């Protein structure tokens, strides 16, 4: 562990912050030159507004006073003639304050303790829940790792750590994703720890904040939209990657509100990977930056009801009764974990093909390969007239290309679970048999949500044929449960969808299936909606009794 790049980063945090300050300052001066006053004025104005109107417990006690003081200093400098030196001094102080807030650390002892504790905790809980017997608390037959089904070229990914810096880019469905990812990468895959972004709001809890701060996390404050802070944040990622620290971030930015796969990405942090690779080329380094997409798959999601209501309220402009975010309730988190462990409900962790920062696939030695199987020299991407240098417009294009390649990988390497296919099929049947938009559909009374079992089997059978064809072409991945005969698939899907939620997305009633929560059913339906599967169905062949 002492040889991990993140361990070495943790030992030299102070030196890293000092270097990062200079790195950020140079970038800001390159982009704003002599015109610092408007940049400072905008930043201080936005921070004064935020510190007064949107305080968090984790914020420094002097937050309001600090930004008010800087506002007065800026006004005084401007009144005195606006010297470049005065503006520069203010800028340096703001950069240092942000960098000290953003940059975390890594303590190997804390990491070992946390991982050992979680491993024991999950093992005990899993054995207890699996037998639904608290006397089995000290059993050891069941392991959490058994619930993780890993797909992808794991050996190749592990080999790439010897040839450069790995940037993991997962999908994001739940605030529990980070825990699942960390456990999966250590237990099921066996790769070093990553530096990762964590929302500053998580640090409101002192215990959680204590551990996250020492596990390689850097703090991300989504309230701060000013240009200096955003430059500090993206520079943290770029400079740490450049220094060889493996990174993990969610390019979708936040949890998927509608439950579907990401169809667009926030390109800022992806651009940091490209910037880091360019700087490594300029420095003459042979190491490369490798991008590894990761797709998580759950049969049920802790925050599903809360997230889908947020999505419906935002897109439909309707007033919905908002649920409380379940992730903020320790009782609900415990109930969720118990539900997960007490039933046979796997989690899929699917790795996409490793690629370079241009989206070219790489071999296990890190060589970039073109479509003809030839090696590619990344230096060519950053050269103009034989000279390697920055070009913002060119690198913006590269970032978009990389984003498109990641989205394509998400789609191809997504693992369809029985709950996904069942929810998609059931909701599509209801959607095709009722007039009106989705906002009226999700509010249908329960008696209007009934589906004939035989008809559901027919639709699922057709969709299985379509999915198997897509899988044969490498356009999707299927879990073994999706390949069960339709009746068993429906039973497995209903069981998994109903494990956690009080209002069940689907229930069986004699020869019919119906929904107790169409909003939550809609959320799970969205997971594979991106594949446009309903084009394989002749919906006019039958009608529904509703």
Image (cartoon, rainbow, N blue to C red):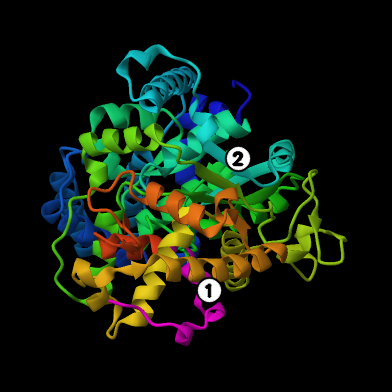
- Percent across and percent down for residue 170 are 51, 51
Instruction: Check the picture and name the quadrant holding the C terminus.
Output: bottom left
Point out the tag, 2 or 1, that comes first from the N-terminus.
Answer: 2
- As helix, strand or loop, the secondary structure at mark 2 comes to loop
Q: SS for tag 1?
A: helix
Crowd class of label 2 (few under 14; some 14 to 19; many from 20; radius 10 Å): some
Q: Quadrant of residue 57?
A: top left
Relative to 153, residue 438 above or below = below
Q: Which residue is mark 2?
A: 243
Label 1 neighbour load within 10 Å: few <14, some 14-19, many 20+: some
Magenta region, residue range: 527-546
Overall secondary structure of the magenta section: helix
Total marks shown come to 2
Residue 297's x, y, as percent?
49, 50
The residue that appears at 57% across and 60% down in the rendered structure is 410
Q: Is residue 415 above or below residue 6?
A: below
Q: What label does residue 24 carry, if any? A: none
Residue with the mark numbered 1: 533
Asked whether, in this view, residue 261 is left or right of residue 325, the answer is: right
Q: Nearer the viewer, residue 514 or 79?
A: 514
Give the CA separation, mark 2 to mark 1.
Answer: 44 Å
Judge left or right: residue 315 versus residue 192: left
Residue 447 percent location from the top left of the image: 21, 69
Residue 197 shows in the view: yes
Determine the residue positioned at 40% across, 47% down. 496
Name the residue rendered at 40%, 19% in the picture. Answer: 124
User: Is residue 528 in the magenta section?
Assistant: yes
As for residue 315 lying within the magenta part, the answer is no
């Amino acid at each position: 562990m002492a040889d991990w790049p993140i361990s070495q980063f943790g030992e030299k945090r102070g030196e890293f912050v000092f270097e990062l300050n200079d790195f950020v300052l140079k970038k800001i001066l390159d982009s704003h030159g002599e015109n610092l006053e408007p940049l400072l004025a905008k930043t201080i104005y936005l921070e004064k507004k935020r510190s007064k109107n949107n305080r968090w417990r984790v914020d420094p006690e002097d937050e309001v006073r600090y930004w008010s003081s800087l506002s007065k200093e800026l006004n005084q400098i401007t009144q005195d003639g606006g010297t470049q030196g005065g503006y520069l001094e203010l800028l340096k102080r703001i950069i240092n304050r942000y960098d000290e807030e953003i940059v975390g650390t890594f303590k190997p002892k804390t990491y070992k303790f946390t991982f050992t504790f979680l491993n024991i905790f999950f093992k005990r809980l899993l054995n207890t829940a699996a037998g639904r017997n608290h006397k089995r608390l000290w059993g050891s037959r069941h392991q959490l790792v058994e619930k993780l089904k890993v797909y992808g070229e794991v050996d190749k990914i592990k080999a790439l750590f010897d040839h450069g810096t790995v940037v993991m880019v997962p999908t994001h469905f739940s605030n529990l994703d980070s825990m699942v990812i960390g456990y999966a990468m250590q237990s099921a895959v066996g790769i070093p720890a990553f530096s990762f972004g964590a929302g500053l709001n998580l640090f409101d809890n002192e215990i959680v904040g204590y551990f996250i701060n020492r596990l390689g996390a850097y703090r991300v404050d989504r309230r701060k939209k000013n240009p200096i802070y955003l430059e500090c944040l993206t520079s943290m990622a770029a400079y740490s990657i450049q220094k060889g620290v493996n990174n993990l971030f969610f390019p979708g930015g936040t949890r998927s509100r509608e439950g579907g796969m990401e169809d667009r990405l926030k390109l800022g942090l992806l651009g940091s990977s490209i910037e880091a690779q360019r700087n490594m080329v300029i420095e003459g380094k042979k190491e490369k930056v490798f991008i590894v997409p990761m797709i998580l798959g759950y049969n049920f999601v802790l925050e599903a009801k809360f997230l889908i209501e947020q999505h419906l309220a935002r897109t439909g402009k309707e007033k919905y009764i908002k649920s409380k975010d379940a992730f903020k309730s320790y009782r609900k988190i415990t109930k969720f974990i118990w539900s997960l462990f007490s039933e046979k409900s796997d989690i899929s962790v699917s790795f996409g093909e490793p690629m370079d920062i241009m989206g070219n696939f790489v071999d296990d030695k890190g060589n970039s390969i073109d479509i003809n199987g030839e090696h590619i020299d990344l230096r060519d991407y950053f050269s103009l007239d034989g000279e390697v240098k920055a070009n913002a417009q060119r690198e913006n294009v590269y970032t978009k290309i990389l984003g498109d390649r990641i989205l394509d990988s998400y789609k191809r390497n997504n693992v369809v679970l029985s709950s996904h296919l069942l929810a998609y099929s059931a909701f599509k049947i209801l959607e095709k048999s009722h007039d009106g938009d989705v906002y009226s559909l999700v509010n249908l009374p329960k008696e209007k949500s009934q589906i004939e079992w035989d008809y559901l089997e027919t639709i699922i059978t057709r969709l299985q044929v379509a999915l198997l064809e897509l899988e044969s072409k490498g356009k999707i991945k299927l879990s073994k449960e999706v390949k069960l005969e339709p009746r068993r698939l429906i039973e497995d899907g209903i069981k998994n969808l109903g494990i956690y939620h009080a209002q069940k997305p689907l229930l069986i009633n004699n020869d019919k299936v119906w929904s107790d929560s169409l909003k939550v059913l809609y959320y799970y339906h969205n997971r594979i909606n991106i594949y446009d599967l309903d084009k394989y169905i002749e919906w006019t062949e039958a009608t529904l009794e509703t």
